[in-house]
Amino acid sequence: MHRNILAAFVTLATLAAPAFAQQQPPAPPAPDFSKVEIKTTDLGDGTYMLEGQGGNMTLATAKNGVILVDGEFAPLHDKIKAAIAAVSPQPVKYLVNTHFHGDHTGGNAPFAKEGTTVVANIKVKTRLATGTQNFLTGVDNPPAPKEALPATTYTHQLKLSLRGRIAELRHIEHAHTDGDTYVYFKSANVLATGDTFTNRRYPNIDFLNGGNIKGMIAATDAYLKLANDKTKIVPGHGPLADKTALIEYRAMLVTARDRMAKLVKEGKSEDDVLAAKPFADLDATWALSEQAGKNFIRVVYHSLADKPGKKS
C-alpha cells in the first residue's frame, strides 16, 4: 500500500493502540476500501452527510458547484464522487479540511487534480507539509505530497461563497489539534465539526499536535451558541447529532477534565490514573472498547499534565 495511505490509516487508528507503550501491539489491518460503501443522509436544503471509511463528510450543493467538508481516504475518491453525482451534477469547487489527520485529508490530492480548491486553516498545511508524529503511538507520519496541500488557507475565519450557498469557516484553537476548523451552513442550519465533536464515543485529543481538552470544551461552547433545536450536527465520527447530543458530550468532557485535574494536582502519574479508572462510569456510554477507554484517560492526562511539545 502507498506509504501515505498507510500512514493515514495509522492516524485513524490512534484510539485502538496504547500510548507510549514500550512494546507496540500489531498494527491493525489496513481497510479493504473495495468493500466500503458511501452512505448518504439528506439533511435538507441541498445538504448531505456522507459516511464511508474514516471521518464523516458534509456536502453542500449550490447552483454552480458543491462544497465538500473532508474527503476521507484517496482510494475512496471515485466512490465519493459517485455519491456526490447522485445528488448534484455540479463539480466539487471546494474541499474543506477540518484538520490534518489522514482519514479526513486523504482525498485532497485526487480532488485537487480535478480542479477542486482545498481549503484549511494554515496550521493544517504546515502539519501536512512537515509530517507529524502520532501522539498515542509515536509513529511518524511522512510529509504529504505537494499536490495534497491546501491551496487556500486562513487563520481565524473565512467565508466560501457559491451561487445560493455560503459556508462559514472558523478556527478553534488547541482542541482536537492546533488547526481545527468547523463549518456552518447557516441557510441549511447544518454544522460540521470535524473531530472536535465525536458523537457517542470518546474523542482523540492529539496533544502532541496542539490538542487540549480545554480547547475541546471551548469548541462545544462555540457550537452551542450557534445551534438550536433544529440544527443538524455532523460529527467527525459517529451518527448524525443534534444539540441535545452535543450538550451530553460537553458534560462528559467537563466531567473528565475536572476529575483528571484533581488527580494531576495530587501529583498522580499516568500509571496511577490508569489504575484509578477515573472514567469507569462514563465508559459504558462513551468507550467503544476497553482500549479506547484507556486511551482517553491517557490523552486527557497528558493534555492537563504536560507542557506543549513534551513527550512522555
Image: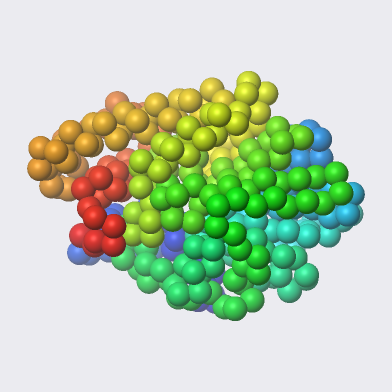
Q: From this view, report whether residue 152 is shown above or below residue 272.
A: below
Q: Residue at position x 31%, y 28% from top?
A: 255
Q: Quadrant of residue 278?
A: top left
Q: Nearer the viewer, residue 145 or 228?
A: 228
Would residue 242 be seen by someone viewing this image from the given angle? no
The x and y percentages for residue 213 are 35, 42
Q: Quadrant of residue 46?
A: top right
Q: Residue at position x 71%, y 70% from top?
A: 112
Quadrant location of the N terminus in the rendered image: bottom right
Q: Residue at position x 65%, y 52% from top?
A: 158
Q: Nearer the viewer, residue 123 or 254?
A: 123
The x and y percentages for residue 175 are 42, 47
Would residue 138 be seen by someone viewing this image from the given angle? yes
Q: From this view, report whether residue 110 is shown above or below residue 229.
A: below
Say how the picture is coloured: rainbow
The x and y percentages for residue 181 are 56, 50
The x and y percentages for residue 201 are 44, 37
Q: Residue at position x 60%, y 28% from top?
A: 227
